[in-house]
Image (tube, grey):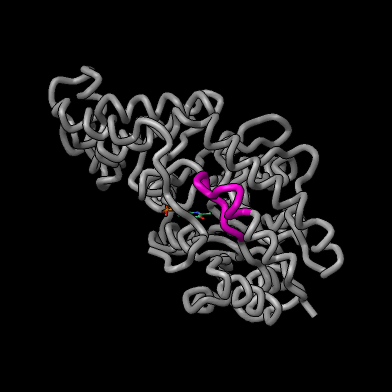
Amino acid sequence: MSSHRIPFNRPSIVGQELEYVRAAIEGGHSAGDGPLTGRCSETLSSWLGGSRVLLTTSCTHALEMCALLLGIKEGDEVIVPSFAFVTSAGAFALHGAKPVFVDIRPDTLNLDENQLREKINERTRAIVVLHYAGVACEMDTIQAISRETGVPIVEDNAHGLLGTYRGEPLGSFGCLATQSFHETKNFICGEGGALVVNRPDWVERAEILREKGTDRSRFLRGQIDKYTWVDVGSSYLPSEILAAFLLAQLEAREEIQARRTEIWQRYAAELRDWADAQGVGLPQIPEHCSHPAHLFYMILPSERSRARLIEHLAAEGILGVFHYQSLHLSEMGRKFGGRPGQCPVSERVSDQLLRLPLYCGLTEAEQADVIERVLSFNTD
Ligand SMILES: Cc1ncc(COP(=O)(O)O)c(C=O)c1O
């Protein structure tokens, strides 16, 4: 529990979470793949343009399932932005792949599509894209490169549920995509995720991998009379207790999104003049993208000014936090050949980006305090 008066994130009950958890237990089905899991999957599928959605225990596990579905093995390469979550790369490294790091664009902080082609070779097995803050990568160019080279796209859509690119939902562009319901996301169940399968011919194998390598999903649908071990796999399915909590959150979509959007827009409007005067960068949203108000960040002019602002906020009990540290400079990244200067934008953003509190239960008065405190800060 954060000791800050205004934490960076605070989970909240927005609807029928507790009633649904009780119903899951009283209904006698608390393990995975019960009716509540089914309802979560159907809801998510409808948000994602009809893609097949399998709930998982985390986004990380969904990414591991992507590695399995793509048959990743020792000697393969996977392209990933350096400014990303550890498991955006780690899930593939777990199966023997070498992550090949690409720098990000300075405006959207997404993988720089203009540096993509030069990284692709005969060992490349996947292009992993991350829609940072739920603002889309340049999917037209990335999809064209994928088509030309035959290298599939995996969307790490942990931030991007309900975001769009040219009107199409994020999570519907890659052959596979992954979602997170970790407590910091828009829709939560503590720890949880989903795999989005946009290739109908991969659905059956995905079900098997998720169910310990068995064809239990077919058994549950009544397609076979007993299930057995048919492939590799693991236990990637969440319990109905988690699905119960998540379903109530998904059903509260309008309320959650309205509140988050309100908070995001207020930060953007009230910090704009200060940011311009102080040389601070704010999120840039291309016209053809809409985002789900997942996070609000600022890019300070230096690492030192960011550290000073964190202290300035903390003195008033407000928690501002930085985000990813460049993967190519991490201990593991260096083992894969990462070196300073390789992804300069990612290195700068890792040192200078700060995120402000943004969660459904943040009150207007609390946000006013955060804004007032930021406005009283001088970057010089
Ligand atoms: C972009 C991205 N991908 C993956 C993850 C991992 O999600 P999970 O905690 O559900 O495994 C995160 C976590 O915050 C993330 O930000």
* Residue 112, image quadrant: bottom right
Residue pictured at 76% horizontal, 53% vertical: 270
**Above or below — where is 17 with respect to 182?**
above
Q: Along the horizontal axis of the image, is 119 left or right of 227?
A: right
Q: Is residue 172 magenta?
A: no
Residue pictured at 49% horizontal, 48% vertical: 185
- Pinpoint residue 240: horizontal percent, then vertical percent: 25, 35
- Pinpoint residue 337: horizontal percent, then vertical percent: 56, 77
| Numbered range of the magenta stretch | 356-367
Mark yes or no: residue 145 visible: no
Q: Along the horizontal axis of the image, is 132 left or right of 256?
A: right
Looking at the figure, which quarter contains the N terminus? bottom left
**Above or below — where is 165 with respect to 191?**
above
Mark yes or no: residue 261 visible: yes
Q: Along the horizontal axis of the image, is 355 left or right of 91?
A: right
Residue found at the very far top of the displayed protein? 222
* Residue 56, image quadrant: top left
Which residue is nearer to you in this view: 239 or 104? 239
Which residue is nearer to you in this view: 114 or 321? 321
Number of disc labels? 0
Q: Main secondary structure of the magenta part?
A: loop
Q: Is residue 364 magenta?
A: yes
Residue found at the very far right of the displayed protein? 277
Residue pictured at 75% horizontal, 46% vertical: 285
Looking at the figure, which quarter contains the C terminus? bottom right
- Pinpoint residue 13: horizontal percent, then vertical percent: 39, 40
Residue pictured at 42% horizontal, 24% vertical: 42
Q: Along the horizontal axis of the image, is 78 left or right of 229?
A: right
